């Protein structure tokens, strides 16, 4: 009988569990379980597995119909705000957990990964983001020249009263980006970022009357909006510092790991409210629209150019890159993150979509926590494929409106500037429009025409956000593939964050090893 127990135990150790369909020792056979299921059971199982995705898609569709139906009723501005109130709650919930999620996930991720592997992962991620953004920018320029959206007469809608972003020098924009990487106050970085403004200073000549010159002097101001880039850099460096501390940093690492897990529990709760919030976000935005017919007639080619470019990059280019590297079905991967993509369309904010994206790639697409919680916050900050594509289309569109023929150097300037400025674009609604002024200034085009872009930004920005978060997710999937491949080559798997973060001299490990020794001793004695 002891040999029978040993055989069962060895079978469990080698295969994870005993096979019920194989004959057991001593002639004991266990009958096979029936795996056949009816069509209704199969449909019910699929619906249960994808219930959240189905509800989210239904929320978008129902929101469109509600918005179109309510548009026929004359509503006051206050009533329109009330229609979008449930959607406003969703955005507030998502923004509420952005900071703890980003900071804790990056600290625990940086502390759990070896510094050499950390640099390798970060380098591969930045290379992927750079290449895909350059491809997106190139698609934008090519599509703008093929469709020529600025070749038709475009009239500015009379009701449009959007403010054009203030003029800023190109060098000051990039200096602001560097300043925001190093925030002077972490508390203020949670809700404010650095921005350059200008003041004019008059200088008199030697005689005090003639040769009066005016100098535009930059000075710093704090503007509303989270400095997510500064928080990301600080969290990564802080995580590396905790790892260097060894056993002394173990308590803080456990704290950030626990905080991170608790935040993801909150995210799982918020996900079930997302379909309702998205439904009212979409409905409220449709109700807000004024004179849609004339707007689409005037800017229809520009809208089509942006949407087709986003579709090409999101449906063909990004899945193609993923397939080339992993040899896996990219559209199965896309289905796994569909809830996050629908949320991105509804909220128009890649930062607000970050919590749901982490949840989706971990649970649906098998991306490890170390990869997703380290790469996705970085991607939400620096990877803006959709914004770069739309900015290139907008720049060529405005050049065509003003009958300006762009030469080769100017086209290259658009590509490089759009790729670089998209890094500093805020992950908030209309964040890409603010950096469009940098590109126009770089090639000498008037920034006043940005008001036309703002007229339809409510639609284009949504597809931009979908493309941004899709690129982040595919980047995480490709990095997971490389990590798994290296682990197979080295004969090891990626360690869990909590084990990797505990130093070898930790009392936890010593206690665990003692327990294992005593357990093995008991087994030997029983044998």
Image (tube, rainbow, N blue to C red):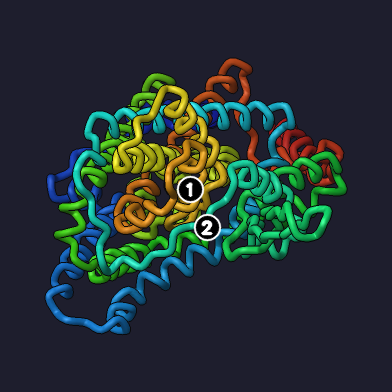
Residue 495 sits above or below residue 346 on the image: above
Rendered image quadrant of residue 330: top left
User: Tag 2: Cα neighbours inside 10 Å, few (<14), some, or many (≥20)?
Assistant: few
Residue 77, numbered circle: none
Front one among 60 and 458: 458
Where residue 267 sits in the image (x, y, percent)?
49, 60
In the rendered structure, are the residues bearing label 1 and label 2 in contact, judged by CB atoms less than 8 Å apart? yes
User: Circle 1 sits in a helix, a strand or a loop, which is it?
Assistant: helix
**Who's the residue at 29% across and 50% down the image?**
50
Quadrant assignment for the C terminus: top right
Q: Residue visible at 54% across and 36% down?
A: 420
Where residue 398 sits, quadrant-wise, is top left
Q: CA distance from mark 1 to mark 2?
A: 8 Å
Write the residue at 23% across / 71% down.
Answer: 287
Residue 216 is situated, as x and y percent measured from the top left of the image, at 67, 54
For label 2, the residue is: 166
Observer-nearest of 184 and 262: 184
Displayed quadrant of residue 516: top right
Percent position (x, y) of residue 414?
Answer: 45, 33
Residue 437 got which mark? 1
- Residue at position x 14%, y 60% from top? 293
Q: Is residue 256 left or right of residue 387?
A: right
Q: Is 119 placed left or right of 288 in the picture? A: right
């Amino acid at each position: 009988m002891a040999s029978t127990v040993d055989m069962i135990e060895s079978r469990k150790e080698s295969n994870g569990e005993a096979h019920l369909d194989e004959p057991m020792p001593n002639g004991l056979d266990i009958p096979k379980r029936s795996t056949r299921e009816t069509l209704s059971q199969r449909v019910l199982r699929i619906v249960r597995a994808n219930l959240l995705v189905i509800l989210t898609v239904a929320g978008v569709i129902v929101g469109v119909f509600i918005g179109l139906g309510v548009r026929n009723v004359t509503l006051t501005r206050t009533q329109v705000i009330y229609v979008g109130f449930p959607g406003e709650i969703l955005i507030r919930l998502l923004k509420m957990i952005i900071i703890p999620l980003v900071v804790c996930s990056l600290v625990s991720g940086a502390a759990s990964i070896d510094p050499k592997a950390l640099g390798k992962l970060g380098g591969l991620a930045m290379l992927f983001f750079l290449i895909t953004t350059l491809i997106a920018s190139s698609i934008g320029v090519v599509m703008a020249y093929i469709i020529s959206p600025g070749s038709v007469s475009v009239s500015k809608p009379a009701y449009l009263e959007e403010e054009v972003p203030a003029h800023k020098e190109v060098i000051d924009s990039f200096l602001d980006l560097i300043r925001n990487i190093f925030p002077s106050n972490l508390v203020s970085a949670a809700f404010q970022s650095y921005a350059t403004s200008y003041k004019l200073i008059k200088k008199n000549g030697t005689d005090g009357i003639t040769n009066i010159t005016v100098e535009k002097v930059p000075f710093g101001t704090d503007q509303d909006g989270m400095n997510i880039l500064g928080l990301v850099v600080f969290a990564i460096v802080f995580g590396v510092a905790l790892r260097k501390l060894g056993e002394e940093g173990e308590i803080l690492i456990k704290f950030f790991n626990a905080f991170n897990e608790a935040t993801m529990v909150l995210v799982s709760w918020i996900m079930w409210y997302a379909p309702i919030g998205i439904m009212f976000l979409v409905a409220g935005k449709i109700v807000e629209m004024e004179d849609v017919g004339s707007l689409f007639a005037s800017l229809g080619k520009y809208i089509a150019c942006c949407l087709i470019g986003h579709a090409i990059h999101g449906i063909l280019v990004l899945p193609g890159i993923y397939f080339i590297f992993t040899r896996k079905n990219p559209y199965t991967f896309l289905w796994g993150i569909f809830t996050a993509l629908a949320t991105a369309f509804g909220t128009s904010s890649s930062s607000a979509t970050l919590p749901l994206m982490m949840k989706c790639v971990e649970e649906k697409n098998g991306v490890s926590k170390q990869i997703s919680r380290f790469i996705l916050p970085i991607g939400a900050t620096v990877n803006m494929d959709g914004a770069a594509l739309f900015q290139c289309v907008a720049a060529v569109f405005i050049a065509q409106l003003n009958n300006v023929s762009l030469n080769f150097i100017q086209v290259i300037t658009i590509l490089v500037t759009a790729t670089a400025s998209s890094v500093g674009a805020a992950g908030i609604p209309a964040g890409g429009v603010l950096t469009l002024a940098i590109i126009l200034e770089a090639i000498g085009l008037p920034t006043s025409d940005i008001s036309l872009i703002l007229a339809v930004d409510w639609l284009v920005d949504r597809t931009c956000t979908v493309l941004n978060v899709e690129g982040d997710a595919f980047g995480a999937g490709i990095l997971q593939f490389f990590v798994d491949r290296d682990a197979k080559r080295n004969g090891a798997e990626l360690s869990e964050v909590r084990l990797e973060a505990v130093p070898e001299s930790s009392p936890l490990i010593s206690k665990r090893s003692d327990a294992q020794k005593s357990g093995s001793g008991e087994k030997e004695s029983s044998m």
